[in-house]
Image (spheres, helix red, strand yellow):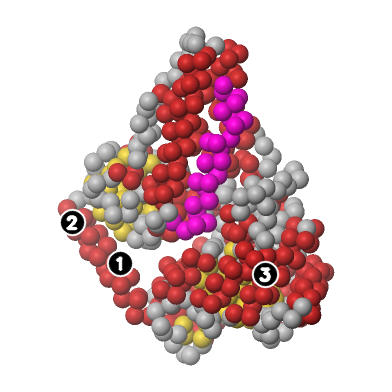
Amino acid sequence: MLKGIAASQGIAVAKVYKLEQPVLDIRTFAADPADEIAKVGAAFEKTIADIEKIKEVASRSLKEEELAIFDAHLMMANDPEFRGQIEEEIKAVKENAESVAQRVANNMVAMFESMDNDYFRERAADVKDVAFRLMCNLTGKEIPNLATLDKPVIVVAKDLTPSDTGSLNKEFAKGFATEIGGRTSHSAIMARSLEIPAVVGVKGILEEAKDGDMVILDAINGEVILNPSDEQIAEYEKKAAEFQAEKEALKALKDQPSVSTDGHKVELVGNIGSPADVEAVLANGGEGVGLFRSEFLYMKSEDDFPDEETQFEAYKTVLESMGDHKVVIRTLDIGGDKKLKYYQFDEEMNPFLGVRAIRFCLIRKDVFRTQLRALLRASAYGHLGIMFPMIATVAEFRAAKAVYDEERAKLIAEGVKVGDDVEVGIMIEIPAAAVLADRLGREVDFFSIGTNDLIQYSMAADRMSEPVSYLYQPLNPSILRLIKMAIDGAHKSGKWCGMCGEMAGDELAAPVLLGLGLDEFSMSATSILRARKMINSLSYAEMKEMAEKALDMDTIEEVTELVKASIAK
């Protein structure tokens, strides 16, 4: 048995499909530049067509924000500088296209990998993906296409590229196991969106697994069992059926309230990235939207910041679709690892700690004002909450709120109808804001805790860095204390506190969060019903007592054992 990280829950039993990329044996020899440049042109055309086809297939199962990765790949494949460098070098050195293209691509990857900017370092993987496809098209090598799977398999690979995950055929790809990755890696996020079982970070699986081997993928406990016995197969097929039956049974909770056994009610709402995601929230019994990532609109735009009308229509659609349910829309959270095609950020040593989110908006108030006008106009069509991200100080919130107040007053003076129940709050994702929550609570209408960044900043550990991924510890007592500060700070001023990070949908975290007094849990739509089942089975009084003990513990291991013991009663 091999151990890994359960990235997307489920159980699957099938044969191994080992995803092994073709080996390229590139040799250098003299060649006619005109012939080689023609080969390069044909290879680029095929590469672009391949990516467009993968995007088309992926659009059937992935959300719009997740499809943006293929737009980035198309941008690279269409980049005249990339192609131009190859063609110019062919003319200069009179060598074969494959050799020159590999050299140019390797130099480009090395350049990205050596950058101080985290975002650009991560783009090296995208350059590799596009360059590898180009090289295969130049050499006539076939890239395995997961869309052509015609029998049930479990995909085993070192990692899955965006092209791989976008090509997955859910009918036959019953799950996957990768040698690298963590819960927040690209492949893990895609697996949850596709709702297929996945175990990542399984050391040694490529060496141990062979094509056609029977394998059990236990993506609940993070285990992979190779060549299981008939008894194990029967046992896990039964578990898989039970898991599927439980998923079906959960649908009965769709219209039920989220309330503890002793009558304490909370709200379970959904995180969305585009208006199209609302359907999944409603289908899974979501009681509202706790986080609409508005940057989707900005990243989708091709040549400039989206105008007021474009934004208004998107926000209005979501508000109308959710009816009386509250919709919390986060203002533009750009910078760090989120870049725009049409705007060049200044180079920074650490962009995650630089000009991003509300800091960018307070510098580019013209962009901020356009978004606020669109939000306020849309507020007439539902119950809107506006959330400012990356707030660190009271002064920052006041500055952002002043711009909001100005735009609201202007719209009213223009005779434009705006909602009279708009709530204005902040994300608590910087430790300083959690510590100052009792003061910030006096100023805002609500808090929503962004645990992905709160944990990253508290632990001083990049959550995308595999060597320090062990420090992504939602149940560490230090993180729980910061969360308690935020919740208590809100409640002290009679305000509500939600959570919109990954932790909100974590089944082990839910009991502690309930006990700490969290009012709203916002998560991916597919996690809502399972979370409701958990909440509805717990005693609020008992979870409060358990949470107090957890705050007084030393390690995440102690807290984990405490939670497991508390919910096993």
Residue beneath the point at 45% across and 43% down:
52
Q: In which quarter of the image is the C terminus?
A: bottom left
Q: Nearer the viewer, mark 2 or mark 3?
A: 3
In the rendered image, which residue does mark 1 sit on? 243
| Figure check: 327 above or below 196 | below
Q: Which of marks 3 and 1 is in front?
A: 3
- How many marks the image carries: the answer is 3
Residue beneath the point at 39% across and 56% down:
60
Residue beneath the point at 24% across and 42% down:
213
Sooner in the amino-acid sequence: mark 3 or mark 1: 1
Residue 166: in sight, yes or no? no
Amino acid tagged 1: Phe
In the rendered image, which residue does mark 3 sit on? 374
Mark number for residue 231? Answer: 2
Q: Nearer the viewer, mark 1 or mark 2?
A: 1
Amino acid tagged 2: Glu
Sooner in the amino-acid sequence: mark 1 or mark 2: 2
3 and 1 marks in contact (CB < 8 Å): no
For the residues labelled 1 and 2, the Cα–Cα distance comes to 18 Å
Image location of residue 378, percent across then percent down:
63, 75
**Farthest residue, direction left:** 230
Q: Which of 80 and 216 is in front in this view?
A: 80
Callout 2 secondary element: helix
Amino acid tagged 3: Ala
Q: Nearer the viewer, residue 104 or 412?
A: 412
Region of the chain picked out in magenta, as a range: 62-87
Image location of residue 64, percent across then percent down:
50, 57
**Farthest residue, direction top:** 30
Mark number for residue 171? Answer: none
Image location of residue 531, percent across then percent down:
44, 74
Within-10-Å neighbours for mark 2: few <14, some 14–19, many 20+: few
Callout 3 secondary element: helix
